[in-house]
Amino acid sequence: MVKRDRWWVVIVGFLLIATACQSATSIPSPTPGPTLTASPLAACPAAPAPAGPQVVLAGQPAPDDLVFDADGRLLISDITAGTVSALNPDGTVERIAGGLSAPEGMVLAEDGRILVAEQRRNRIVAIDPKTHAVSLWRAFPNRTGRDGIDGIGPVLPSLDSLGNLLPTGGNVIVPDSPNGVVWRVTADGKAATQIATGINRPAGGGIDANGRIFIADEGGPVWVLDPSKRRFATLPTPDDVLVARGGHVFVNTLGDNAIHELDSQGHQVAVISGIQQPQGIALDDADNLYYTEFAKGRVGRIVRTFVLDPAKVTRIGPGHYLICPVIRRALGFSTPLGLLTGSSRITAILRLVQPGTDSSGAIEVQTTEPSLGITVNGGLLSQSETVSLSP
C-alpha cells in the first residue's frame, strides 16, 4: 500500500509539472497600448503653383546661360562678372568658379564636370564640381573677328532605346558660332568631327528622344540634324534650344524678347513674351522652365508641371518624425504623382501616404540620420529634395 501511494505521488507530481509547463508556453504576449501609428496618417495639403513668370534670383550683373548640375542646383554663367554660380534650394548663391573670360553656354558632361564656353577666348573649359578647379577642355580657332563660341551642348546619350551602348555616347555637340559649323567632340575634348556647315551663327543646341539634334542659328533658322541638316523653324534671332521630356521644343529668341514653345514638327504651341533679353534657358527634371533676363540681371521661372517647396517636419519622439511634403501643381496639371523615399539599416519608413491630385502625401519615419531624401515623380517628370530632420 505504501509503495502504491509513492507511485501515485510521483505520477501526480509529473502531471503538475507538465501542466505548469503547458501553461507557461501558452501565455499570450502583452497587448501593446495605443500608439501614434495606430491612428490614420492624413495626407498633407497641396497648394497651387504661382501662375506665370516669377523671379527666383535678382541683382546679378549679367546672367547669361543656365544648366542644372548633378545635385539639382541651377548653375548660372555671368558674362560680366566672369563667374559660374549655383543657386541653392534655400535661395543662397554659391560661386563655383571665377576669372572666366565672358562665360556663356554651359552643359553638364557625362562625368559630372561643368563645361563652359569662354566666348572671348573661343574655348571650352571644364570645372570640377568638387574642387572647382578650372582646366582647358578644348580650344577652337577663330580668325573671323566675330564673337567666339556662344552655346554648348547637348551631350549625346550613351545608350539607345534598347539599352545598347552607342559609339558616340558622351560626345558633346559644340556649335562653333564664329565659324558657322557644328562639331561633335569626344568626351575628353581631344577629337572633333564636323557634323554640319553653312550656318550663319550657331548659338545653342538640344536633342530629342529620337536622337534628332536641334541647332539655334542667330540668323533666324532653327535647324534639325536628322542626320542631314534641314530647317525646323524660323524665328527672330534664336539663341538657344531645348527639348522637353514630352517632346516640345523651347527656343529663346533675342529678336522679340520671347521664348517660343514648338511641337515636335515645328508648329508653335505657345509664346512667352516680354522677357528682357532671355540669353539662357533650362528645364528642370519636371520640365519647369527657367530663363535669364540679361537686361534686368535676374533669373525667372515658369512652373509648367509641379514643384516641391521645403517639406514641413514634426518631431514626435526620439528619431521619430512626421514629414509633410509640399507639392505645388501648375494650373491644369493633374498627372498622378508618386512619393518615394529610401529606407536603410538605420532608417525605417513606418508609413507612407501617396499624394493625390489635391494632396501632397505624408511620411512617418524612424531614423538617426540628420536628413532624408524624398522624390516625387509622375512618369518622366520628377522633383527631389533633401529634408533636414531636427535632432
Image (tube, grey):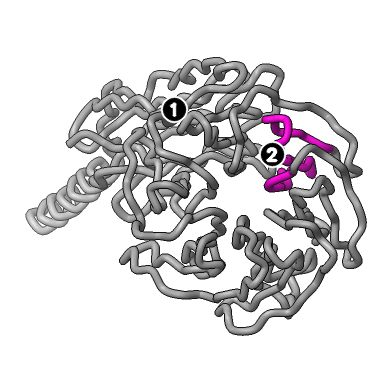
Q: Could you tell which of marks 2 and 1 lies nearer the N-terminus?
A: 2
Image-based side of 375 in relation to 321, left or right: right
Q: Does the segment drawn in magenta span residue 168?
A: no
Q: Which of marks 2 and 1 is in front?
A: 2
Q: Mark 1 points at which residue?
A: 309
The location of residue 12, given as percent across then percent down, is: 18, 48
- Magenta span of residues: 238-262
Q: Does the segment drawn in magenta span residue 256?
A: yes
> Which secondary structure is most common in the magenta stretch?
strand
Q: Regarding mark 1 in the picture, which secondary structure is present there?
A: strand
Closer to us: 364 or 155: 155
State the image quarter where residue 146 is shown: bottom right
Q: How crowded is mark 1: few (under 14 residues within 10 Å), some or many (20 or more)?
A: some
Q: Is residue 146 visible?
A: yes
Q: Residue at x 15, y 56 (%)?
A: 7
Image-based side of 339 in relation to 342, left or right: right
Closer to us: 103 or 8: 103
Q: Which residue is drawn at 36% across and 33% down?
A: 91
**Disc 2 to disc 1, how far (Cα)?**
27 Å
Image-based side of 181 in relation to 229, left or right: left
Task: Look at the picture and state if 93 lies above or below 95.
Answer: above
The location of residue 106, given as percent across then percent down, is: 54, 56
The location of residue 236, given as percent across then percent down, is: 78, 37
Task: Look at the picture and state if 191 lies above or below 259.
Answer: below
Three-letter code, disc 2: Asn
Image-based side of 354 in relation to 391, left or right: right
Q: Name the residue under label 2.
A: 252
